[in-house]
Image (tube, coloured by chain):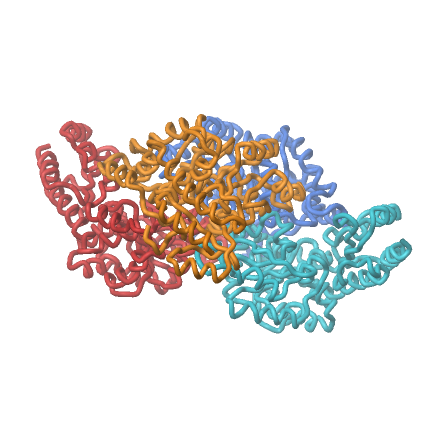
Chain colours: A orange, B red, C blue, D cyan
Amino acid sequence: MSQSRLFLSDNAAPVHPALWEAMQRADRADNPYDGDALSQELDARFAALFGRECAALWVATGTAANCLALATMCAPHGGVVCHREAHIEVDEGGAPGFFLHGAKLMLAEGEGAKLDPDDIAAVIDPIRDDVHQVQPHAIAITQASEYGRSYTPDELAALAAFAKPRRLGLHMDGARFANAAAFLGGSAQEAARAASGPVDSLAFGFIKNGGMGAEAVILFDPEAAAQVRYRRKRAGHLQCKGRYLAAQILAMLDNDLWLANAANANAAAREIAAACGDRLMHPVEANELFVRLTDAERDSLRAAGFSFYDWGAGAARFVTAWNTRDDDAHALAKAIAAL
Amino acid sequence: MSQSRLFLSDNAAPVHPALWEAMQRADRADNPYDGDALSQELDARFAALFGRECAALWVATGTAANCLALATMCAPHGGVVCHREAHIEVDEGGAPGFFLHGAKLMLAEGEGAKLDPDDIAAVIDPIRDDVHQVQPHAIAITQASEYGRSYTPDELAALAAFAKPRRLGLHMDGARFANAAAFLGGSAQEAARAASGPVDSLAFGFIKNGGMGAEAVILFDPEAAAQVRYRRKRAGHLQCKGRYLAAQILAMLDNDLWLANAANANAAAREIAAACGDRLMHPVEANELFVRLTDAERDSLRAAGFSFYDWGAGAARFVTAWNTRDDDAHALAKAIAAL
Amino acid sequence: MSQSRLFLSDNAAPVHPALWEAMQRADRADNPYDGDALSQELDARFAALFGRECAALWVATGTAANCLALATMCAPHGGVVCHREAHIEVDEGGAPGFFLHGAKLMLAEGEGAKLDPDDIAAVIDPIRDDVHQVQPHAIAITQASEYGRSYTPDELAALAAFAKPRRLGLHMDGARFANAAAFLGGSAQEAARAASGPVDSLAFGFIKNGGMGAEAVILFDPEAAAQVRYRRKRAGHLQCKGRYLAAQILAMLDNDLWLANAANANAAAREIAAACGDRLMHPVEANELFVRLTDAERDSLRAAGFSFYDWGAGAARFVTAWNTRDDDAHALAKAIAAL
Amino acid sequence: MSQSRLFLSDNAAPVHPALWEAMQRADRADNPYDGDALSQELDARFAALFGRECAALWVATGTAANCLALATMCAPHGGVVCHREAHIEVDEGGAPGFFLHGAKLMLAEGEGAKLDPDDIAAVIDPIRDDVHQVQPHAIAITQASEYGRSYTPDELAALAAFAKPRRLGLHMDGARFANAAAFLGGSAQEAARAASGPVDSLAFGFIKNGGMGAEAVILFDPEAAAQVRYRRKRAGHLQCKGRYLAAQILAMLDNDLWLANAANANAAAREIAAACGDRLMHPVEANELFVRLTDAERDSLRAAGFSFYDWGAGAARFVTAWNTRDDDAHALAKAIAAL
């Protein structure tokens, strides 16, 4: 990564070499759309990873992945409960309104941009059960959260236990799912299952983790999968050379590259976190750090060559990536410690 | 291209080597989304090509390109006139209904899947000017058409002269725009301008012409461009590593690769056409051939290793591509001549 | 009806006196929306009429009634097969596109604007079962049809037998349902059941039959009914003084007024039809007549004080209504016979 | 009004006798839809009232009126700023999401459910001017507000001065517009102009003020009016016997009945307010009272025959109507004073 973008975000990092190789291997012609051999492999590969039947469809963006999944759970006249700072609410340009035909996002509060059943109940319990008020149809959570917090298996189980009797779908925005999984630990299968828990659908992100332009929508409900296939086409997201997307995803699954990449990013974040002490605004459970820094401190770090986003007044966000080098992490840790 | 797919379609061909190189050069980090240096270059490059101001935005599919452009011209309560066999009507899974919020496609007849003013008038003149009937807001044509026919500059001028006083937008689906341009001839600038004429927007296709996953939406109306930027994000089509898409498109523009690739495909089609004689259902003005063949003849060609789609009973469709080899074209021409 | 509108349409006729009385009786305050005693009575009253469980909701227009029902059967990415001249296609200003979020109307041909299974199969059988083509989700028929033709119980049974195994919903636009029922004959229960057959939903029209502004959406599927209640509110169709709409509908059901009104209109149409002989373009099975008339003949009828719509060149449409007087029908019959 | 509903709401009150008469006069046949003489009169009548050109269209509900107007100002990818407790956010079943094709409501805080420029700026100033965040396109205010507060002409002028340079449309939900106008005082013209100020559109409510089922959408922008005519039909809101709706509205305008009815309701509210003293949660500037009452006090009022809604714990909402009788208002005032 060029110096100039160090710690700014993981969303513009280069593509991992293994993915370049896989894409080039896919260059020989095959069936178009998702009829190629690689795309056809996805369902089984993810089912093996998660230990339960699922359908896995590639799409080019996390926004599309989230919205296609949510549209299977929430009718146009329904609502999706999410955190007030959820990406789908704040940073997707109103995409849920488009894909869900005007369904409503219902905003909940929760520490670290995570939600627990009480947070959700606080939003939906006051809703009168009548046609004048939009009724909740689904819940969307982000793993890891927008503040780099990870849901534990117990927390996910509690959410599912809350959702099921209320007939609410449970979707996970996993733009940084790999980082959460790496944080929770274990083998690839263990980590994937721990981090996803019993959700109904998952937008499994690869782009921030070394991919080029492929995320996987994972649907654990077969009826939902059939619907998403039609909706993906309808949204202009069925690429005719889909084999290049499938190739990226499969290369990520091969040798658990997805987990290794995330572990590298997390390790860099952990090292920097150790230098931050009380400056940390949130526990670091993935690859993002939110750090209290004065204007002068931010200036001094930037003068030293580090780049990052301001996080309002008096704070900054640092993001590590699959390719963050050890010495860059050391350097930042040292610089912060020295402030 | 593997033998097994020869002449089936151009939509699954490999990626041109120059594009692979360009993508890999783009691998160094840059701003995300379309803030990178390559994406920023697009407007000017296309303005130079077309000789008029325009905005150029990458998207991953022709379906998205068409629908994003059409949404700027046609309100949800309006209609878009297109040919009964237009791709947007027949093969985009209802995408116009999604992107245009329920606007109506109004189906016209026209020879070779082309439309002229009379074809369009036949559809819209009977529409009563009252709120009970959907009013036309735009026209969509395909260059080259779904039957491989190309619009001439005069034909495009006539369509624009028809559209303007009626305040109808004029959009061009250019999935095979390059092939039409190559057919019309001249330098890259001359060919591009001849093939686009005075349209308001163009979905300039690169994927069928050697690209991986990038088409360009060209908007000659600056207000429309601003709107498309928001709508692209909202449709989940703003990729965070957009530089890889921009790289593909720029590599296509460099050295007029787009035109050379199309010329190669067209030449192959022309050679095969010469062998078809009366079997041709449509003049060959791009890279598609629609050929009358009996069942036995189709079987015999397939037995000889050629692949292609049946086109109903008694006919077949052959498509050449940027990478169709001369000897494959010779072989097919010879085989058809020998039938 | 003022002379000036005789036979123009039934859609602007006065309100039947019994409905005025019923509305005024409803003037005393009650619960708002559909919580009033009258609205609460609707389900049971229609269930008794049709002999099967149903939900019945008032709405102000047939357009809303049709679209609310269709939206329960057809997902945004699906299609509704209807006749090319169906009201929902030709005269509802694109409302199905709005209420169904861009779903597609699939246009079938059929004599007299009626559809039979073969007509529908001709449209849907060629649809490839893949995501590139919109798949049919429902069928919409009109009883009586746009040309005043009525479906018989056997024809309806055949349509349902076609629809069920294909999992297609079957909706009936009953703007002139009463006229079809009156044509089919029998008691109110017999006629209602014969005319509706085994449809999944019915837009039961009252406005053209002496009402002011209330139609009934009848849903024979309880899950669909729940959804329509929410969608009706969301479409701005839940009136707060709904009791005035319920009052109109109940007054129509009382003493089988709906059937008597329709029978009156049908009788007038029958009498005029008898005078038309070969001029009739369609058998008269409800209250509409499509009659071949030269320009001179149309002029002469208009000079005699009759009003009606031209039906293209060389034809005219006459519509009788609940309040068409015997002597007006006699006069028109006599005038046509004398041409 | 039956005792049992006294002070519950104004939305289920009977229809004013003058409207019954006007509707019955409209019973003679006329052109359908809005082609009748009464509907044709609306534009001019409202232009005279407001002193500026406008189009006036009837619809059956305030929800439809608000949403049709807002859809002319806010693109599907935009947002509408409104109060967190605005009716369009809280009580319209998600109708704005439907009519505006997924546009977003942006929730502002403001005392008494009113908004001032600072309240709005607090919501929109933090929005980054990029495609990742939904941009505001319009502002919606409620006159009188959901807490019975009225905007003054100066406050409205300030909102318009804020909106114009930012190119934000300004819509007014006037479900109780008449009550605000009556509060602001003056002749009908003076009151109407004071209460509407320089808004771009107004949903002028009549139903809560003695109507049956007709509100007026007032559009001060002629282009917006043309669009609303199409959208009204498309939403199933173009009734074929529209003359009965026009008759209601015209009867309200005749002799300034709308203002007299509202003045009666306001007077009753004022009298009750005088008895409430410190119990009032909001100044009473229309016909709604929000009153602090313990559980025991609420019980005691109900035992005395008064009906009203609880307003959370420790409070109640009382609404007076056009037909609230003096002695009922006296009685309630006396009962509250005696608590």
Q: Tell me which corner region of the image, top left, top right, bottom left or bottom right, holds residue B15.
A: top left
Left or right: C152 in relation to A254 = right
* Res. B275 in view: yes
Left or right: B264 in relation to C305 = left
Residue B262 x %, y %: 18, 49
Residue C45 x %, y %: 68, 34
User: Vertical placement of D182 versus A16: above or below?
Assistant: below
| Residue placed most toward the observer, B186 or A199 | A199
Q: Tell me which corner region of the image, top left, top right, bottom left or bottom right, holds residue D220.
A: bottom right
Left or right: A55 in relation to D297 = left
| Residue placed most toward the observer, D317 or A333 | A333
Of all residues, the one furthest to the right in this rendering is: D338
Left or right: B131 in relation to D188 = left
User: Vertical placement of D284 versus C29: above or below?
Assistant: below
At a point 25% along the width and 38% down the height, the residue shown is A21
For the image shown, how many numbered marks are present on the structure? 0
| Residue placed most toward the observer, D161 or D270 | D161
* Res. C329 in view: no
Residue D218 x %, y %: 60, 63
Residue B97 x %, y %: 43, 47
| Residue placed most toward the observer, C54 or B128 | C54
